Amino acid sequence: MAKAAPDIVIDGSLDVIATATRQIACSAQPTTFTEANATFALADATMAGGDFTKANGDTSGRKVTMGAKAGALIDASGTATHVALVRVADSTLIYVTTCTSQALTANGSNTVNFPAWKVEIADPA
């Protein structure tokens, strides 16, 4: 018997990701909201509903794409190795991924750009 997950099931997870209100460049992999939002935080950008686009996956299933964010002020110096999505209102860590390692230097005016990126959930195999 074949396995199946209707789009509505996969979209449920993607809908949670799309509730993120902040995207944060982190110096290490955060495992809690506090680590993402403070301990490892180097730079952040505000996210809103229009920053997330759901669509069919590139291979199968579904995906949500986070829109690019330019000019995020660098708040702390360090090497960004991860990006975290958080929901600030209830202190929730929503999603963490790796990023291309990049040295960031805070001086009150330096900024960093977050490129568009996606989370894809494949159909069951």
Image (tube, rainbow, N blue to C red):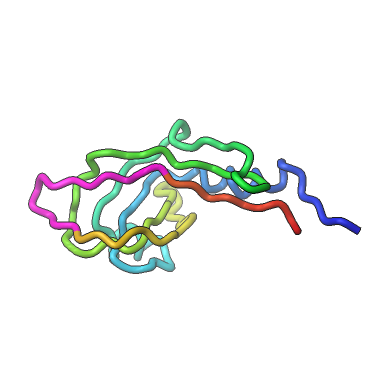
**Is residue 38 shown left or right of residue 77?**
right
Q: How many marks?
A: 0
Task: Give the magenta part as a residue range.
Answer: 104-116
In percent of width and height, residue 11 lies at 65, 43
In the image, is residue 53 above or below residue 78? Answer: above
Q: In which quadrant will I find the C terminus?
A: bottom right
In percent of width and height, residue 102 lies at 25, 59
Q: In which quadrant will I find the N terminus?
A: bottom right
In the image, is residue 36 above or below residue 22? Answer: below
**Is residue 112 shown left or right of residue 64?**
left
In front of the other: 97 or 88: 97
In the image as oriented, which residue stretches furthest toward the right? 1
**Magenta region, mostly helix, strand or loop?**
loop
In the image as oriented, which residue stretches furthest toward the left? 107
Q: Which residue shows up at 24% across the image and 57% down it?
A: 42
Q: Which residue shows up at 48% across the image and 37% down it?
A: 52
In percent of width and height, residue 13 lies at 61, 49
Q: Kindly indicate the quadrant of the structure image that contains residue 55.
A: top right
In percent of width and height, residue 22 lies at 37, 46
Residue 83 forms part of the magenta stretch: no
**Is residue 118 shown left or right of residue 30?**
right
Q: Which residue shows up at 37% across the image and 56% down it?
A: 83
Q: Which residue shows up at 61% across the image and 44% down it?
A: 57
In front of the other: 123 or 84: 123
In the image as oriented, which residue stretches furthest toward the front? 59
Q: Kindly indicate the quadrant of the structure image that contains residue 21.
A: top left
